[in-house]
Amino acid sequence: MPMAGIFSGLEISASGMRAQRIRQNAISSNLANAETSRTADGGPYRRQFVVFTADSDRRDVRLLNKVRALGGTQTENGHLPIPPANFPRDERFFGNGVSVAEIREDSRPPKMVYDPVHPDADENGYVAMPNVNIIEEMTDMIAATRAYEANVTAFNATKSMAMQALQL
């Protein structure tokens, strides 16, 4: 494995941690505004959710192409041979990481709650409340936290392997 593989592993884990942090921020915003019936735009708060996509930067594939251009070269002492350009590789298996494509508003309608004394009640006494389900948000928060922890574990494992390789 070229040295770039170790660093791309760290980059992939870091991108996962960044994405899950943004997801946790969106969930926190949803929980904080679960009772907000009036926003600056008018109407109740709308639940937000994060859309992930595979990172299209493909840094490691670009690096692989640079390595291929070097051919089958080695260091002065014959260490770390770089595979020749014709060495078979499948670029589909090179990691990309993850990035946040966008943060969308949930299209579900607001919850209508009967509360005739509420200042935002309509003529029938109903108030449009946010389309935030506390149980759903807490479940998403747990999933985002676990995904973040998994990325931390992968990051630390990769770091540990690199440190052990340096001790050889």
Image (cartoon, rainbow, N blue to C red):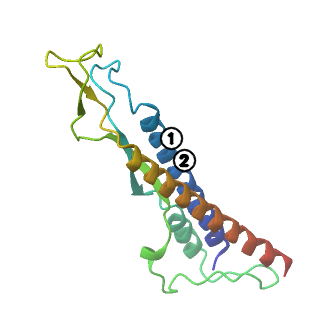
Tell me what residue is drawn at x 33 percent, y 41 percent.
Answer: 104
Is label 2 in a helix, a strand or a loop?
A: helix
Q: Which residue is mark 1?
A: 25
In the image, residue 71 above or below residue 45:
below
Number of numbered discs overlaid on the protein picture: 2
Q: Residues within 10 Å of mark 1 (few under 14, many from 20)?
A: some
In the image, residue 64 above or below residue 104:
below
Residue 156 in picture, x, y percent from top left: 70, 66
Q: Pick the residue in front: 65 or 91.
A: 91
Which quadrant does the N terminus fall into? bottom right
- The alpha-carbon separation of the residues under discs 1 and 2 comes to 6 Å
Q: Amino acid at mark 2?
A: Arg
Residue 55 in picture, x, y percent from top left: 45, 57
Tell me what residue is drawn at x 44 percent, y 80 percent.
Answer: 90
Give the residue furthest to the left.
Answer: 124
Q: Pick the residue in front: 76 or 105.
A: 105
Tell me what residue is drawn at x 60 percent, y 67 percent.
Answer: 9
Q: Which residue is mark 2?
A: 21
Q: Pick the residue in front: 2 or 132.
A: 132
Tell me what residue is drawn at x 40 percent, y 48 percent.
Answer: 135
Is label 1 in a helix, a strand or a loop?
A: helix
Q: Amino acid at mark 1?
A: Asn
Residue 113 in picture, x, y percent from top left: 24, 29
| Residue 139 quadrant | bottom left
Residue 81 in picture, x, y percent from top left: 69, 83
Q: Residues within 10 Å of mark 2 (few under 14, many from 20)?
A: some
Are circles 1 and 2 on residues that touch, CB within 8 Å? yes
In the image, residue 89 above or below residue 63:
below
Which quadrant does the C terminus fall into? bottom right
Q: Taking 126 as reference, is 158 left or right? A: right
Q: Which mark is residue 87?
A: none
